[in-house]
């Protein structure tokens, strides 16, 4: 595929087991030009998620993609992390050496603004953690809004996993999510309705375990830990790799089926803070504003992931 046909993306993430696999899918797929990796507090504190992003780059030999540290606190609320799922480091399981690469001096928000303003409107933002960096960039420089080709985010759903109503990424910074969802930028949402179909079954884990390179070994070890915590916390036999879905969609949108629906972010409810209020039945009569992913082609999805992992030496 020629350079001009590559889809340019910035991954904004909080690694995170599934974030790590999302990075590898992007870097290992020729159809994607990974412009940069920005980090945010979410699964763990931003210092840890940044170090984890650098470790992912190190293990896979990703040397030419800059990594920028972003916001360490939500816009309004107190920080909340997910150590029960991802461990204290944010990416427990594999034993990895400390990265030799350094994070860039530029702040993630500044990087996002600069790259978008310099672009021809051909960069897709792929936030797979809390939306703090994206919202802060929008607030600081509204001129970026027409420059964003699309936002393909992981978050939300018609049900919750952190509270009965709210998915983790949206709950952690619902004020930021509200800014993003009300921005008018084209949004495709990989919510729990979709990502809970992206299960790393035993058959999938076996396929990945047979990939004879450091990236394959790394992902195999990630899935062992992730399977254990998802079983203990949620009772899932097979862990869902939520964040990977956003990158897979950027590679080939046909991997998911979507519906254009109205989605609003709840920031005031006592029991519903962080809820993505998805008007599935069209009862509000309000204009649909989000492409909501509903169904995953499981076989095509995992074929993409294994092909990308085999790309690394």
Image (spheres, rainbow, N blue to C red):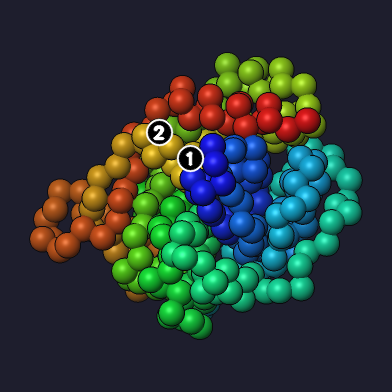
Residue 209, horizontal then vertical, whole percent: 71, 21
- What residue is shown at x 23% (from left), y 53% (from top)? 261
- What residue is shown at x 71% (from left), y 74% (from top)? 106
- Any mark on residue 108, and which? none
Q: Which is more toward the observer, 137 or 165?
A: 137
- What residue is shown at x 60% (from left), y 27% (from top)? 307
- Any mark on residue 255, and which? 2
Is 153 drawn above or below residue 76 in the view shown?
above
Q: Residue furthest bottom?
A: 140
Q: Which quarter of the figure is the N terminus placed in?
A: top right
Q: Is residue 137 visible?
A: yes
Please say if the residues under marks 1 and 2 sit with CB atoms less than 8 Å apart. yes
The answer to whether residue 291 is left or right of residue 71 is: left
Q: Quadrant of residue 265?
A: bottom left
- Under circle 2, the secondary element is helix
Q: Is residue 234 visible?
A: no
Q: Which is more toward the observer, 258 or 111?
A: 111
Residue 290, horizontal then vertical, whole percent: 30, 56
* Cα distance between the residues tagged 1 and 2: 9 Å
Residue 141, horizontal then vertical, whole percent: 48, 81
- Under circle 1, the secondary element is helix
Q: Which residue is mark 1?
A: 251
């Amino acid at each position: 595929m020629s350079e001009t046909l590559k889809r340019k993306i910035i991954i904004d993430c909080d690694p995170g087991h599934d974030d790590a696999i999302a990075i590898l899918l992007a870097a290992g797929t020729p159809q994607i030009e990974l412009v940069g990796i920005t980090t945010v507090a979410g699964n763990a504190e931003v210092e840890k998620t940044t170090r984890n992003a650098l470790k992912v780059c190190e293990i896979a030999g990703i040397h030419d993609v800059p990594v920028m540290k972003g916001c360490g606190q939500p816009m309004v609320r107190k920080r909340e992390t997910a150590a029960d799922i991802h461990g204290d480091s944010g990416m427990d399981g594999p034993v990895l050496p400390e990265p030799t690469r350094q994070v860039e001096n530029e702040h993630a928000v500044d990087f996002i603004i600069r790259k978008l303003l310099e672009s021809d409107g051909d960069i897709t933002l792929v936030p797979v953690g809390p939306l703090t960096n994206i919202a802060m960039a929008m607030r600081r420089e509204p001129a970026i809004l027409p420059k964003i080709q699309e936002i393909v985010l992981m978050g939300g759903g018609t049900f919750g996993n952190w509270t009965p109503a709210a998915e983790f990424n949206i709950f952690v910074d619902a004020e930021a999510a509200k800014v993003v969802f009300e921005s008018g930028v084209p949004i495709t949402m990989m919510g729990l309705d979709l990502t809970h179909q992206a299960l790393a079954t035993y058959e999938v884990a076996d396929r990945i375990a047979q990939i004879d390179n450091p990236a394959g070994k790394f992902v195999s070890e990630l899935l062992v830990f992730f399977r254990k915590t998802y079983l203990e916390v949620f009772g899932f036999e097979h862990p869902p790799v939520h964040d990977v879905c956003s990158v897979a969609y950027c590679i080939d949108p046909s991997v998911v089926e979507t519906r254009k629906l109205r989605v609003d972010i709840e920031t005031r409810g006592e029991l519903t803070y962080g809820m993505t209020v998805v008007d599935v039945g069209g009862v509000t009569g309000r204009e649909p504003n989000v492409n909501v992913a509903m169904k995953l082609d499981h076989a095509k999805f995992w074929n993409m992931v294994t092909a990308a992992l085999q790309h690394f030496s």
